[in-house]
Amino acid sequence: MRKDKNLDELFRDKLLNYEQEPPAYLLENVLAGVSGARRNRKIVFWRIAGVAAALLLAFVAGWQFNIWNGQDIKQPVSVSQQIATEVSPDVKTQLENAMSDNHQQVPANTQLAELVTESKVAKSNSISTIKTSKSETIISPVEKLTVAASTESNLLKPLKSLFGLIRQKNEPVANLRQAQKSKKMMIDINEKTIDQQIMEQNQQLMLTENQVKGKAKWSVGAQVSPEYNVSRSSHSQVYASNMVSASANPVDLGGGISVEYKKGKRWSLQSGVYYSGMGQSSGNSSYSNRYANASADYASNLGKEYFNAPVNVDAITSKMMLNSTAGVIQFSSVPVGLVLGTNLEDKTLAASAVVISDTRFIQNFEYIEIPLYVRYTLLDSKFDVEMMGGFSSNLLVGNETYMENGVGRSLVGSTKDMETMNYSGTLGIGLKYGLSKRIYLNVEPRVKYYLNSLNSNSSVTYKPYTIGVFTGLSYEF
Amino acid sequence: MEDFKPIISDCIDGSRKAQSMLYHQFAPKMFGVCLRYAKDATEAEDNMQEGFIKVFTNLKNFRHDGSLEGWIRRIMINVSLEKIRKQHLLYPVEDVAIYDSVNFSDDVIAKIAADDLMKLIQQLPPRYRLVFNLYVIEGMSHQEIAKEMSITQGTSKSNLARAREILKKKVHENFGEMIAQNNYTA
């Protein structure tokens, strides 16, 4: 022990104040480095200021865009009763007997016309007009995936060369042979003990790994997700009194391309372009008590029980409107194959007609999403666990309403007053598994919540949220 | 103690002349520090360059309540440590081989030139070199080393013992004749 202390002291005495003149060029390098660091600081400042200004500008522009859009369409839905009053009384049928059991819901003097406006167009015609837009819509994300797959195949090329490099590094025998060529190295190897050689090989391996890991700053990926939409909406009383309730489409498809920039060991910023489809379906699935009394009558006449979708039809232009939970569905005309009951004489009813055929209205909305997410790595190992959150701008690119009945599905109109630009917040947990040093498999459950109402109609607040499990591959470089 | 306040102030203002003066004041000693922590002169030069750039860019944070030399020295050590952490990774390889203990008189080491001792230290594996430097030359405790290097105190002690054994063996191999001569004269 004392000998060790003596050894330590001898080394300390000789090396503690050891001085050696460094090469002259070092000073120039240092001074150049210092002025470079000053310049970099200035550049970073201006860069941050630039990004902040751009974000502010984008926010203000989006806000303004929202306001301008709102000014055009901020008119509340007016459900006209004019048509009902204009209906000719020549075909009235007294319903007192039929309604005797429903005094509380329907006034005693309510008369309902038997006039049933039924489209006379043949079924063959209806089929020919059915559009296949829905199927096209579904194809579009698949096309995106194909693009992503081809990108990935390009990315595999540098990966193969990387594998080659690693394999080469992993061949200690080859390294040893190469080392033996040099006489100096040969002497060193003879001098070194076995463990020192192992240590050096380990260090070389770790150095290679470190260099590969250290350079990974960017990551690109492609993900796809089934999206489950949960409809959340509220409405004014007048609007709701003539509204059909809706159920969200069970599962829609979403996905896209992501770009991630790693800032430090744990933090990263992510953006990209995502497609997100969502929708809901309204129609005769739910039952409105308001029309229950009428349904009994129509049911007896037609043998059907579909009377709960109140609509307004303009007698002159034949344009039809239906209040849905997401907003007013506007039809360019009364769709072919739709059976309506009109001439409602109930003055308390806002609707001018009810749908009496087996019909469902499917509203589809498609968005292109530009997100800005912040990610934090909770667990950094072979199986990474990350938390992510952030905001997205969502651009409405698709707004279609389809009618589905016995003859198929056809495009019949769109939802009025849908905001072109929306903002949403997203939270999620990312699970990342390294398939290789560069390629990762990602599974990421996310919840997306729309911050503003998707519909600008003042009577409707429609803020659905979406739950999805994004699955895909990412490539780091 | 020399008053560096005016020169520090000029350095902060970006005066190249002041920066050169400060550099020349400490460069030889700091190069000595960097040499001890590096495997060769090239790595030491890199570390010193990076260290001095840090010194000049962080000089405004220097509080004049301590020694400037100590502050610069600490930066050089930190840069060297960080470099070893990044490049070599402190990969644990322990107790692989048992070294035969070599005994010789302390006078022998006293006769070896500082330059030669420096080379011996540079030949140590990175982790042993770090622990030996921090414990023996800087005078840090095993507890402090363990905290600095994210290892256990036991590992630090074991590494130090191993470093000492390797150094003794190297002395024996490189300066064997001197030892023999010393024993003969004794």
Image (tube, rainbow, N blue to C red):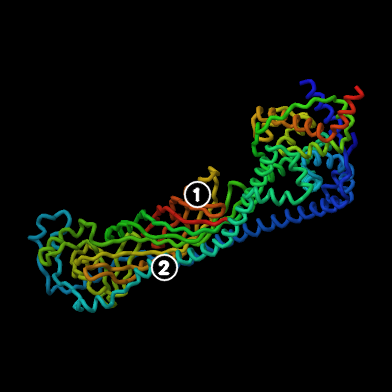
Q: Chain of mark 1?
A: A
Does residue A86 sit above or below A243 in this rendering? below
- Label 2, label 1: how far apart the Cα atoms are: 28 Å
Residue that carries the numbered disc 1 in the rendered image: A433
Q: Position of residue A322 (x, y in %)?
A: 29, 66
Could you tell whether A47 is left or right of A277 in the image? right
Q: Nearer the viewer, residue B178 or A25?
A: B178
Toward the viewer: A367 or A74? A367
The disc, 2 or 1, on the residue closer to the chain's N-terminal end is: 2
Label 2 sits on residue: A140
Q: Is residue A428 toward the left or the right of residue A92 in the image?
A: right
Measured from the top left, where is residue A409 in percent x and y? 28, 69
Q: Looking at the image, which residue is at 69% across and 50% down? A: A177
Q: Are marks 2 and 1 on the same chain?
A: yes
**Residue at x 78%, y 43% (from the top left corner):** A187
Q: Determine which quarter of the picture holds residue A71.
A: bottom left
> Compared to A277, does A378 lie above or below?
above
Left or right: B88 as drawn, with respect to B71: left
